[in-house]
Image (cartoon, rainbow, N blue to C red):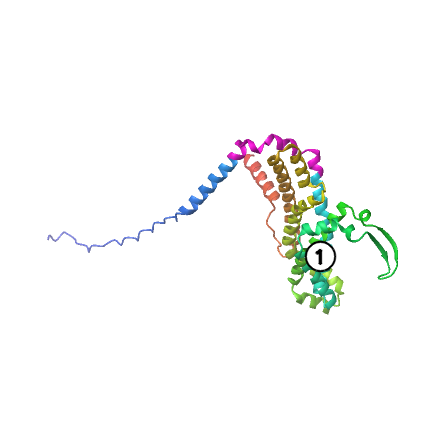
């Protein structure tokens, strides 16, 4: 080796570790299930369009006809009456069950047990035939003379019998809904209110019920929607509500399928409106617990439109 050659120690470069290759998870079963659902939905939609039995022309002729609109209005009236009266009576029954009085608690429990045990259609037929049991209804001294009386059929007509039957049936379920919401409130708040000298009725009205509404509303909304559809049972009383009128029409012209579609469309629209109302009522009563509630669908739509306009400008 020559003297002018300088040898340097060899330096071995340290190789950096190779980055791991990330392989996404393959969800083959999920893809297959999604594809199968899409195919089934497409087949159903194709059948709706191509199957002549649906008779969409007949559907369009009747869906907004005067008879059907009036029948839908009767359905809404029955639902409104039974909802308001049923939940008023149910609230009273709920507090009777929570009462320390054994008489009130027993009477409320018995009422709820009886009316939840009897099918709604049986109750409606019973009230429709009340005159067979009591020819006259009057006011007087208990177990004594009657000062004023009236014929049962005159006092309680067909609509009245339907409202009474729906109300009494609904009250039994409303009582348990309200009771569940009340017992969900922390009892320590009532103790604190009592220590401050707040009257009992004011405790219930200003402290218990506003908090109980958050637990009551979801179940109550579901019950009201069920009641809307349950009003179809009053067809046995020949009341001109939605389902009864649909039956009358298809019994006359034989167009069963399109007329059933008419009833279905109206029930879907009405239940959707009730669902929207339930959403906003629940949102209102959630203000105390959720200070920053998520935006409503309408607010999201407005923000989206505003962002599109801003980008286009």
User: Does dot 1 land on a helix, a strand or a loop?
Assistant: helix
- On the question of residue 207 being in view, the answer is no
Quick check: 195 above or below 135? below
Looking at the rendering, which quadrant does residue 110 occupy? bottom right
- Residue farthest along the top direction in this orientation: 57
Q: Is residue 41 visible?
A: yes
Q: Residue furthest bottom?
A: 195
The location of residue 63, given as percent across then percent down, is: 65, 34
* Residue 249 or residue 217, whichever sits in front: 249
Task: Using a 10 Å C-alpha cutoff, classify the residue at mark 1 as few (fewer than 14 neighbours), some (14 to 19) or many (20 or more).
Answer: many
Q: Which picture quadrant has residue 53? A: top right
Residue 147 location in percent, x, y? 89, 56
Screen quadrant of the C terminus: top right
Q: Position of residue 165 (x, y in %)?
A: 72, 51
Quarter of the image for residue 261 reads top right
Q: Residue at x 41, y 47 (%)?
A: 29
1 and 112: which is toward the camera: 112
Residue, x 65% and y 60% (percent of image)?
180
Residue 278 shown in magenta: no
Taking 141 as reference, is 223 left or right? Answer: left
Residue 231 in picture, x, y percent from top left: 68, 46
Q: What is the magenta segment's predominant secondary structure?
A: helix
Segment colored magenta: 46-70
Disc 1: which residue: 90
């Amino acid at each position: 080796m020559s003297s002018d050659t300088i040898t340097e120690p060899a330096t071995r470069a340290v190789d950096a570790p190779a980055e791991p290759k990330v392989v996404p998870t393959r969800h083959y079963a999920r893809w297959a299930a999604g594809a199968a659902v899409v195919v089934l939905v497409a087949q159903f939609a194709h059948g709706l369009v191509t199957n002549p039995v649906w008779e969409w022309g007949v559907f369009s002729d009747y869906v907004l006809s005067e008879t059907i609109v009036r029948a839908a209005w009767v359905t809404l009236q029955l639902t409104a009456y039974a909802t308001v009266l049923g939940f008023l009576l149910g609230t009273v029954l709920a507090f009777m069950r929570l009462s320390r009085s054994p008489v009130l608690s027993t009477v409320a429990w018995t009422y709820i047990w009886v009316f939840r045990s009897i099918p709604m259609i049986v109750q409606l037929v019973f009230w429709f035939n009340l005159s067979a049991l009591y020819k006259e209804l009057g006011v007087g001294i208990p177990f004594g003379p009657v000062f004023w009386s009236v014929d049962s059929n005159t006092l309680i007509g067909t609509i009245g019998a339907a409202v009474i039957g729906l109300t009494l049936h609904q009250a039994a379920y409303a009582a348990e809904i309200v009771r569940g919401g009340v017992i969900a409130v922390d009892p320590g708040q009532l103790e604190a209110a009592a220590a401050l000298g707040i009257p009992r009725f004011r405790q219930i009205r200003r402290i218990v019920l506003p908090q109980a509404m958050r637990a009551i509303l979801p179940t109550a909304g579901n019950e009201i929607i069920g009641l809307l559809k349950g009003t179809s049972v009053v067809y046995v009383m020949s009341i001109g509500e939605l389902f009864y009128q649909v039956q009358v029409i298809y019994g006359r012209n034989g167009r069963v399928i399109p007329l059933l579609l008419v009833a279905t469309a109206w029930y879907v629209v009405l239940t959707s409106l009730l669902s929207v109302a339930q959403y906003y009522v629940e949102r209102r009563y959630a203000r105390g617990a959720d200070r920053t509630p998520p935006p409503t669908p309408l607010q999201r739509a407005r923000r989206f439109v505003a962002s599109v306009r801003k980008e286009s400008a």
